[in-house]
Every structure is written in structure tokens, then in C-alpha cells.
Amino acid sequence: MKKYKIDYILLGTVIILALFGILILASSSASLSYEKFGNTYYFLSHQIILGLIPGIILAFLAFRTPIAKLKRWAPILLLMNLGLMALVFMPGIGTALGGANRWINFGPISFQPSEFLKLTFVLYLAAWLSSRIEKAGLRKKSEEFSQTFFAFLIVIGLVALLLIFQPDVSTLGIIVLTAALMYFLAGTPLWHNILLVFAGTGSLFLLIRLAPYRMARFLVFLKPETDPMGIGYQVKQALITVGSGGVLGLGLGMSRQQFGFLPQSMSDSVFAIIAEETGFIGSCILILLFLTFLWRAFNMIKKTSDKFSQLAAAGISSWIILQVFVNIGAMIAILPLTGIPLPFIGYGGSHMVVELIGVGILLNISKNTS
């Protein structure tokens, strides 16, 4: 039987993060779970059965799938995902919550196609850019640069259109930033990347101005004291929650803010609960674990000579770490509030499954490095 030389530090880091997420969820979801369903373990069991377990199974399949097949299947996976993105608008299949069409229901199972888009789009870009480099001489022919640039903008535009109509601008931001980084790492001209930065920044501010609720979030970010009992309530409570933990924290399961004070305490705001229960030291350890994840991923990128593997690893690790930065940044008010989950930890089956699949692919790449 073949022995795989995988990155056990990366694997161990993700296992610790996922188990810690389950432990925190057991604490932060108990009161709300009992209030809504009369069962303190409803959300916990839901996360394990529909998030952790299928995520592990699919991660193992991704680990065992040859890299060449992943590259070949990437366009098909993206097309399937885009089809699912369109289905969210279909009555009877798509579900609207809070004014957003982001979920698909198949019987008792519901999921967010936009979460899977983060992975399928990364794989597609990695396959497409690596093919352009290897077959079309991207680094040598200036006309190939222009063709690649405009094709890149068209693909980004199609994805952006679907996400804007949902609307899910937070996910769009993560995807665009990840795609821009991959485009830069593909060895494209610097002026292309500068143009992308200006175009992306301008589009972001336009989207903020066009939606009143986004504008309100942005204004609260600039002036946290604005509407403290309305749009600014979550930010205010998150800061109180983080500060309540002090240096050592109140202890696991001892959070006070989870009892109806902090909105989304088991999902978007879970980092604030972690800071309250484990304190500054616990928060630093959590951030160190994510930095370890990033270190191992980029170590992997340096060691592999396959361009598809390099770009895929860069895209997966960047997307996950960007989510960490955005989520934690929003909780400590250095970034505007978004609906981006904390990877491996926040409640939500869709993001847990796709993040674990991403880890499976990273481990797959690691076994082929020198």
C-alpha cells in the first residue's frame, strides 16, 4: 500500500480548529437551540451531521483524486456551480432569507451554492491560468496578456452578476480578492494588476452607494457611535464581548453575551464569544493556528513545481485566510461588518464542507511536493 507524504502539521492544525469550533458551538448555541427547538444540541448536531461529517468524507475524496483530474474537471465543476447559483432564484427550490436569495433546498437539506463557488472558481482559475502559461507562452507574448486579461474580466463579471443579484457582495469581495491574487501570481503584467485594483475598488464603492444597508454599515464603520441600538448594535456588542474576556477569559461555556445580547453569536460573531471565553491569550492562540495554516500552505506552494497546484494552493489558502481577516476585523471594528463566516469554526454546514474539501486538495498537493 502506497504511503503518502502529506503535511501533518497542516492536517493537525485543521483538526484542532475544527474540534475547537465544535466545542465553542456546543457552548454558544445551547441557549438559542433550546429556546427554538427545546433541545440544547440541535445546532451542534446539525453542524456535525450536515457540515463536519460530509466535509471529512468529501475532503478524503478530494485528497485521493489525482491532481490532473481536478484540473480537467475544474471547468465542469464551475459550470455546475453556476447552474446551482441560478437555481437560487427558482421558486420551490431557492429560498430567500432576510431579503437574500442564497440558499437551495432539496428536501431536508439546504446549502449555499455561493460557498462552493469559492472553491470551484479557484480551481477553474488555477486550471485556466496554468494552461495559458504552459501552452500559450503567457510570459513571452504581449498579445496573449491582453487576451488573458479580457477573458479574466469576462469570467469575473459573470460570477459578479450572479452574486450581486442574490445579493452576496461579501462573498463577491472574497472571490475577487482571491482571483486577483491568483492572477498576479500567474506572472501577468503589473499594470494589469494595478488596473484590477482600481476597477475593484471603484466597483466596491459603487455597490456600497447603491444599497442603503451597505452604506449604513460603512457609515457605522467610520463612526461606531452611529445608531448604537440599530445598525451599529452588533458592532457595539461585539466590542463589549471581546473586551469582557480580558487576558485569560471567563472560561469555556461561561460567556454572558451569548444569551441574546450579541447577534449571530454562534456564526458571524463567534470570534467575539471566543475572545470572551478564552481572553486575549486564547484569541492569540487561535490567530496563531490560522497563521500556521497559512505558513504550511505557502511552504507547499514553494515546493511544488506544477503551476496548477501552485495556483490552486495559493487560491484556497488565500480565500480561507481572507475570510479569517475579514471576520475577525469586523468583530474588533477595524473592518466593516460583513456576513463572512470564521473558517472551520463558525456555524454553517456549507462553508464547513467546502473549507474541508479545500483542505483535502491542499493535502493532495502536499503529497506530491518534493
Image (cartoon, helix red, strand yellow):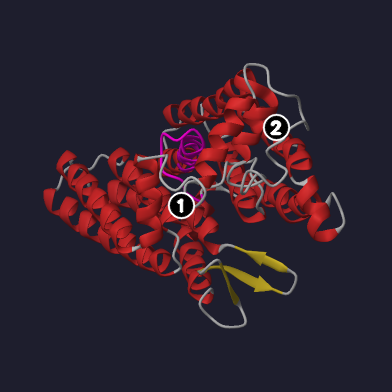
Q: Is residue 263 left or right of residue 124?
A: right
Residue for point 41% across, 50% down: 217
- Going by the numbered disc 2, the residue's amino acid type is Lys
Residue 328: give x, y in percent of width and height: 51, 35
291 within the magenta span: no
Q: Nearer the viewer, mark 2 or mark 1?
A: 1
Q: Position of residue 306 (x, y in %)?
A: 42, 39
Report the residue at 29% width, 58% height from top.
209
Image coords of residue 349 (percent x, y) = 67, 54
Question: Considering the image in quadrants, where does the N terminus appear?
Answer: top right
Chain part drawn in magenta: 319-339
**Disc 1, SS:** helix
Q: Which mark is residue 352?
A: none
Q: Position of residue 183 (x, y in %)?
A: 30, 45
In the picture of the structure, the residue carrying the numbered disc 1 is 123
Question: Is the stretch drawn in magenta largely helix, strand or loop?
Answer: helix
Q: Which residue is mark 2?
A: 3
In-front residue for pair 8/94? 94
Compare residues 337 and 305 and report the one nearer the observer.
337
Q: Marks 2 and 1, Cα distance to the nearest angstrom?
A: 26 Å
Q: Name above or below for residue 164 compared with residue 228.
A: below
